[in-house]
Amino acid sequence: MSKQRDVEQQNAEAKAKILRAMEAFDSRSGLKSWLRPALENEGVLTGAGILVALSELPDQGGDLFQGIWLTAERQFWSFAILVSRESNPVVEIERLENVTTSTIISAHVPGTGRSFGHLAIEVLEESRDG
């Protein structure tokens, strides 16, 4: 039987995952070249915002990127965008929706401590300060 992680460990792991998504955006020029413009073309205010979740799946038509962008105004936008492997142009925005109202933002979730939304906002605020 595996040892249950305590709340602080769970929060630290969740926050590290958010930081990895943010760092992936900062370090991958291909991702930077199309994600922000794709979101902005759909009306999402990306300035001073951060990428807080990201996954990449190979797809028949390219690579499918799924994630969540957190705006400076604390709006959470979930996306699924198909990108060509050739030159990184966006092939199709499969999903883009504001999930702010369905994102839990609490510092005290029973059993898990701080919610994903709360941790993401912490990272956003820390990125502004640093």
Image (tube, rainbow, N blue to C red):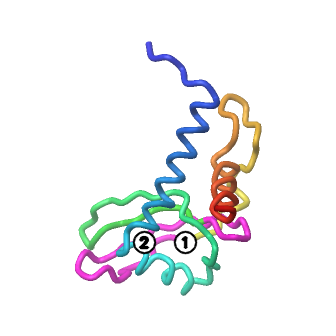
> Magenta region: which residues?
70-95
- Residue in view at x 36 percent, y 66 percent: 64
Q: Which residue is mark 2?
A: 81
Residue 96 — which label? 1
Return the x and y of residue 116 as percentages of the image width and height.
63, 47
Along the viewing direction, whichever of 83 and 113 lies nearer the viewer: 113
Q: Residue furthest front?
A: 130
In the rendered image, the vertical position of residue 112 relative to residue 96, given as above or below: above
Q: Is residue 7 magenta?
A: no
Along the viewing direction, whichever of 77 and 6 lies nearer the viewer: 6
Residue 37 lies left or right of residue 43; in this view the side is left
User: Of marks 1 and 2, which one's residue comes earlier in the chain?
Assistant: 2
Name which quarter of the figure residue 69 lies in.
Answer: bottom right
Return the x and y of residue 55 as percentages of the image width and height.
41, 57
Dot 1 lies on which element?
strand
In the rendered image, the vertical position of residue 8 relative to residue 103, given as above or below: above
Pointers 1 and 2 in contact (CB under 8 A)? yes
In the rendered image, the vertical position of residue 4 relative to residue 99, given as above or below: above
* Quarter of the image that includes the C terminus: bottom right
Give the number of callouts: 2
Q: Is residue 76 magenta?
A: yes
Q: How far separated are the C-alphas under marks 1 and 2? A: 8 Å
- Residue in view at x 65 percent, y 60 percent: 124
Q: Amino acid at mark 2?
A: Ile
Along the viewing direction, whichever of 28 and 100 lies nearer the viewer: 28
Q: Amino acid at mark 1?
A: Leu
Dot 2 lies on which element?
strand
In the rendered image, the vertical position of residue 31 relative to residue 111, given as above or below: below
Residue 61 — which label? none
